Amino acid sequence: MSAVRCRLAPIASSSLPALAATSRLPLLKSTRLFSTNTTPKAVTSTVDVLGNVPTLELQKLLEGGHYRSVVNLCGPEEDYISPANLCEKYRLRYASLPVDSNKLSFGLGESLVSALSTMPHPLLVQCQSASRASAAALLHVASSPHEQPDAGSGGTAELSMSPESKGTFMSPTKALKFAEEKELPFLGKPPLKQWVERYLCARHVSLGHEDPNLFFRQLFDRESCTFTYILADPRTREGIIIDPVLEHLDRDLSLLDEYGIILKYALNTHVHADHVTSTGCMKARLDGFRSVLSSGYSSARADLHVDHDAKLFFGDRYVVARSTPGHTPGCLTFVLDDHSKAFTGDALLIRGCGRTDFQSGDSELLYRAIWTQIFTLPESCLLYPGHDYQGRECSSVWEEKRYNPRLTKSLPEFKELMANLGLPQPKLIEVAVPVNLEDGMAKIPSGELRCFGCQG
Ligand SMILES: [Fe+2]
């Protein structure tokens, strides 16, 4: 049973463009605009898009010898005619990249652009209605300087290389104008159109607004006064997130997607007692990154346990993990490659430091770690803490070495001070610590692990 065959009227084979095995051009050099999804639509001179067609028609298209590869965007649950067997028969390269219209991310756009640019051309992109296929083809056109229409073409003539466009991306406005002129089917599907616009805008914007070599955002959770940080390499758009908070998962994922940041690592500076990390839930919503925790918590769950001096790369940038125990045994400070920034978690706070009266805290360890691992950084190094309760955003090594009321004391004075802080237990400690030891996942009665936030 094929729902698609009911929806799309089969076309007579005689109405298909003539296929000449000896010629690769007649079918695709045309710039005609097609009104049916059953006939290939030329988006560029070497990329055609196609909806689902009866097997016989598809066979006629592929046996003509014109196409060298086929990219299929239908998922296994969809009722479509898979070209896999035909591709094998005619020795064509074949790739299946299921596109779920409910999961349209920047990373998906990257995957499609990569596939369409590396598969041999001429290439046929297929899905059920040609909407996803035409969206993918447009992303390819807009991201590939050699595919961009030259200035005088009006977007409907043959595509050729424009010398000034080499090494650049087509602007979102120009790309969408091209799509309208070509009457690409995805324009009729608002979610697809919005996704294409978002992808094109993210590709077009420069990530390094202030520093051309770094994208940097500091985010805040009012409930626990926790700071979350996002860093990315503007060139490759690969990035990391430090200490994400469960309640702000949507906020953080939106920001990553809006800027087209490809997340490599989600770092937790330590096992938090005052909030639940979002790293577990994030994995249900985003692929391709690894959660990171110190090897000091070897029995805690994380995709990657790192030791002192471990480098975590995102693009050409990296942070180095420095062991700064004392607040907990596994606390890490992440230092940016150029020593311009350090993310101190709860080891060193602005004019303060993490408490040492629970989670196996040790005030002497903390004091020594801060003086040997943080205060040895350049005095210009900006310090970004895990929390601040008084509205401060960052400090510097220079400031804290001189004005931190705790760390400027002698070790014996510091130990006595820390032993007598008399702080109440964090409100969430009973909930947060066991969940954070499981990377933000919770054990349900059957023993299985589920996202703590959504139980999914
Ligand atoms: Fe903490």
Image: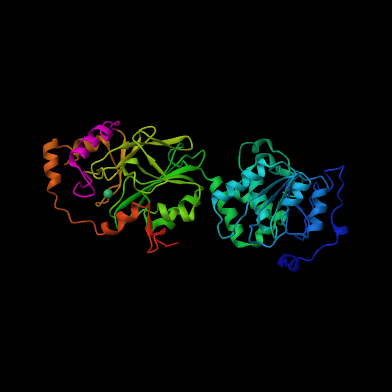
Q: In this view, does 68 lie above or below 15?
A: above
Q: In which quarter of the image is the C terminus?
A: bottom left
Q: Is residue 189 above or below residue 397?
A: below
Q: In this view, does 381 lie to the left or right of 38?
A: left
Q: Is residue 375 magenta?
A: yes
Q: Quadrant of the N terminus?
A: bottom right
Whether residue 30 is visible here, answered yes or no, is no
Q: Is residue 22 left or right of residue 73?
A: right
Outermost residue to the front: 446
Whether residue 210 is visible here, answered yes or no, is yes
Q: How is the image coloured?
A: rainbow
Q: Is residue 1 left or right of residue 18?
A: left
| Near-viewer residue (275 or 401) | 275
Q: Is residue 74 magenta?
A: no
| Near-viewer residue (331 or 179) | 331
Residue 183: x percent and y percent?
Answer: 71, 57
Residue 238: x percent and y percent?
Answer: 49, 42
Q: Say which quarter of the image contains residue 46.
A: top right
Residue 184: x percent and y percent?
Answer: 70, 56
Per the rendered image, the range of residues in magenta is 352-379
Q: In this view, does 396 lie above or below 63?
A: above
| Near-viewer residue (439 or 114) | 439
**Which residue appears at 14% of the width and 49% of the height?**
421
| Near-viewer residue (278 or 155) | 278
Q: Is residue 419 left or right of residue 39?
A: left
User: How many numbered discs sit on the rendered protein?
Assistant: 0
Residue 291: x percent and y percent?
Answer: 41, 47
